[in-house]
């Protein structure tokens, strides 16, 4: 038994849940569509190019949690999961998770996307362990701030180290699956890094280091 760690967006999913949550909110008129989509596109481009200011992005992306009632947020999230996430759950990703489950491995999803958006997605995969960016709450309402360290780039390593200390798990024999060069700090920590449908920079790095490269996409994708 070992730790099997999975990135979420564009790894287990055929898209980005954070970006799609923003699209959903703008399509429903919950946020100003033109302004929100323009910033959403800009931040997503910054992420893919490796120059995202994570704190600036989180001030933007957590604002709708702050500005709306919890009961409305939960209702919208249910609709979002059904409409935007269900169709992009990759069958090969499900199969990969199940292969590790059958081996008796400990399953963990780690993602920069916030916990509000990602906790029901982890449930869709039957993965109980989730490390995600945590939106701060006070008296049952979101504040728009972040609690603790965002799980992004080196922050993923920091958050994982905290989780390991609390859980008693370790990285002996561990595997981490990711699509993004933003995850290089964590890929370098595990025993078995795997590039999944990698971006250009991660593909070059994987080739140079001899890391395996796999695809979870259907051939038509």
Image (cartoon, helix red, strand yellow):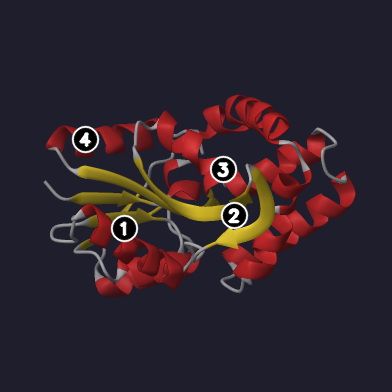
* Sequence-first tag of 1 and 4: 4
Say which element carries label 3.
Answer: helix
Dot 2 corresponds to which residue? 136
* Residue in the image at 27% along x and 73% along y: 209
Q: CA distance from mark 4 to mark 3?
A: 25 Å
Dot 1 corresponds to which residue? 163
Dot 4 corresponds to which residue? 101
Q: Is residue 15 in view from this perspective?
A: no
Task: Give neighbour class at mark 2: few <14, some 14-19, many 20+ (Cα, 10 Å).
Answer: some
Say if 214 sits above or below 14 in the image: below
Q: CA distance from mark 2 to mark 4?
A: 32 Å
Viewer-side label of 1, 4 = 1
Say which element carries label 2.
Answer: strand
Dot 3 corresponds to which residue? 116
Q: CA distance from mark 1 to mark 3?
A: 19 Å
Q: Is residue 127 left or right of residue 11?
A: left
Say if 50 sits above or below 27 in the image: below
| Residue 39 rendering spot, x and y as whole percentages | 78, 59
Instruction: State yes or no: discs 1 and 4 in contact (Cβ < 8 Å).
Output: no
* Sequence-first tag of 4 and 3: 4
* Sequence-first tag of 2 and 4: 4
Viewer-side label of 4, 3 = 3
Frontmost residue, 129 versus 88? 129
């Amino acid at each position: 038994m070992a730790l099997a760690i999975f990135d979420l967006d564009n790894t287990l999913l055929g898209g980005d849940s954070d970006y799609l949550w923003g699209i959903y909110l703008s399509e429903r008129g919950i946020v100003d569509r033109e302004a929100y989509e323009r910033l959403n596109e800009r931040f997503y481009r910054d992420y893919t190019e490796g120059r995202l200011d994570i704190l600036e992005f989180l001030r933007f992306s957590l604002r709708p949690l702050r500005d709306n009632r919890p009961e409305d947020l939960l209702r919208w999230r249910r609709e979002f999961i059904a409409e935007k996430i269900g169709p992009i759950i990759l069958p090969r990703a499900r199969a990969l998770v199940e292969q590790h489950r059958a081996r008796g491995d400990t399953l963990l999803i780690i993602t920069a996307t916030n916990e509000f958006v990602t906790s029901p997605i982890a449930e869709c995969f039957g993965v109980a362990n989730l490390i995600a960016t945590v939106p701060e709450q006070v008296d049952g309402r979101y504040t728009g701030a972040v609690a603790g360290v965002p799980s992004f780039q080196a922050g993923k390593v920091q958050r994982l180290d905290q989780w390991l200390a609390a859980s008693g798990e370790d990285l002996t024999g561990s595997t981490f699956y990711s699509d993004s060069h933003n995850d290089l700090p964590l890929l370098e920590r595990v025993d078995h890094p795997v590039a999944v449908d990698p971006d250009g920079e991660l593909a070059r790095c994987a080739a140079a280091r001899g890391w395996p490269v796999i695809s979870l996409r259907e051939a038509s994708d």
